[in-house]
Amino acid sequence: MSRLMVDDVTKTDARALLNVNKMAMISDIVAPSNEYLYASGTDELTVAEGCVIAVGGAGIFKTTNTLLTVANLDVGSAFTAGSDYYIYICDNRIDAADEQYIISLNSTYPNGWNASNSRKIGGFHYGRCRMTDSNLQPVNRSGIIFGTGWESAVSNGIVPRSVWTLGHRPKCSPEGMVYLGGDTWVDIYLNSDDGAKGLKSAYGCAPMTGTEGMNWYNFSERLAKSGKRMPNYSEFCAYAFGSPQGLDNANTNAWTATTNTGRDITGSVINAVSAVGCVDAVGRVWEWLNDLVTRAEHATSVTHHPTEAWGWDEETPLKTGEQNYDVGNIYQYYANSLAALGAGGYWADGANAGARAVYCTGCPWNVSSGIGGRGACDSM
């Protein structure tokens, strides 16, 4: 390491010069709050004042309160539901000109700009939003907490808790996530295949389940590859809060009608969104959780554990799932003693599906078409 600056009032030492390039190396982004971007309306964001932001080692800007809308899009004139957008500050290299803000679907740099004259400063997800009060309590369109018709008080917009910045974001990629609180982010959507042996949170996709050979272990492995983990039951109850209970005879509030025969795609039910913006936390498929419990019944299995006694299973039940290789055995007192919790309910559970519904019988090695997952991640 070498000394970058010295205290030389004569400026005869080049290290004493404070220029734009040197400020860019020092400052990065200096902001009064890590959340210097926030949703200020359904289709509107605000850039907070007082941030100092360097762009490409050239322009350094101090922000004022600035509204961003569809007028800031690089392409198109409307936001698209189910999409992730990125916010850039751009410098046209004219000394007398202020910064420009561009909203783009491009994750590298916006159309018409490049990596040297633009800088990504945050982003957001545009999707399903539930009407709530300032305390995240679901309200109807008259503003009454859980008032008549609150279930359908839903519209498309910038998902407020999906807005992220370079100082307020998950450790993993922030696309398709919302901030739960307590330094935890969760996926907006049930997880689907990302095509690279990981998982993604995306609108309009078939959630991965045992139909694709997945069990609890596989979800854990794939989430780790995506930089995420399984949520626990406490976190589920928090991010599912505000999701309407399922119905036996309709899919109005969640994908739960007892006549359903399959999972369908994420986000197909308008009302199935929670207070923080998580979609399908009730119904569609159960969600594997990180909690493990011991099952209550004392059963034996001719194949695996024929007697009630501590010992290794005769044939390991663990060798199941997407990646079928030798993974050892389980030492237990009776058959199928270990269970991993699931939450929310699945496509045909009707009114039993809900924001605190829990499933206590699934062994982590079970490969079931009715159980999927959702990722969680700590904040930066």
Image (cartoon, rainbow, N blue to C red):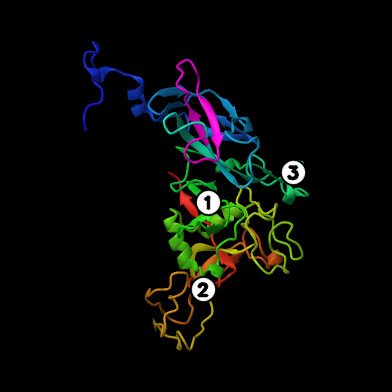
Q: Residue at x 67, y 54 (%)?
A: 272
- In percent of width and height, residue 14 lies at 24, 18
Give the CA distance from mark 3 to mark 1. Answer: 27 Å
Judged from the image, the secondary structure of the residue bearing numbered disc 1 is strand
| Residue 41 lies in the magenta stretch | no
Question: Residue 220 or 144: which is nearer the viewer?
Answer: 220
Q: Is residue 75 visible?
A: yes
99 relative to 17 in the view: left or right: right
Quarter of the picture holding the N terminus: top left
Which is nearer the N-term, disc 3 or disc 1? 3
Give the CA distance from mark 2 to mark 1. Answer: 24 Å
Q: To which residue does mark 1 refer?
A: 186
Q: Is residue 34 visible?
A: no
Query: In the picture shown, does residue 128 fall above or below 326?
Result: above
Quarter of the picture holding the C terminus: top left
Q: Given the current orientation, which residue lies at the most extreme front position?
A: 112
Q: To which residue does mark 3 refer?
A: 144
- In percent of width and height, residue 144 lies at 74, 43
Q: To which residue does mark 2 refer?
A: 366
Give the CA distance from mark 2 to mark 3. Answer: 43 Å
Judged from the image, the secondary structure of the residue bearing numbered disc 3 is loop
Which is nearer the N-term, disc 2 or disc 1? 1
- In percent of width and height, residue 254 lies at 69, 58
Highlighted magenta segment, given as a residue range:
87-110
Question: Mark 3 near mark 1, Cβ–Cβ under 8 Å?
Answer: no
Q: Amino acid at mark 1?
A: Val
Q: Residue at x 56, y 34 (%)?
A: 103
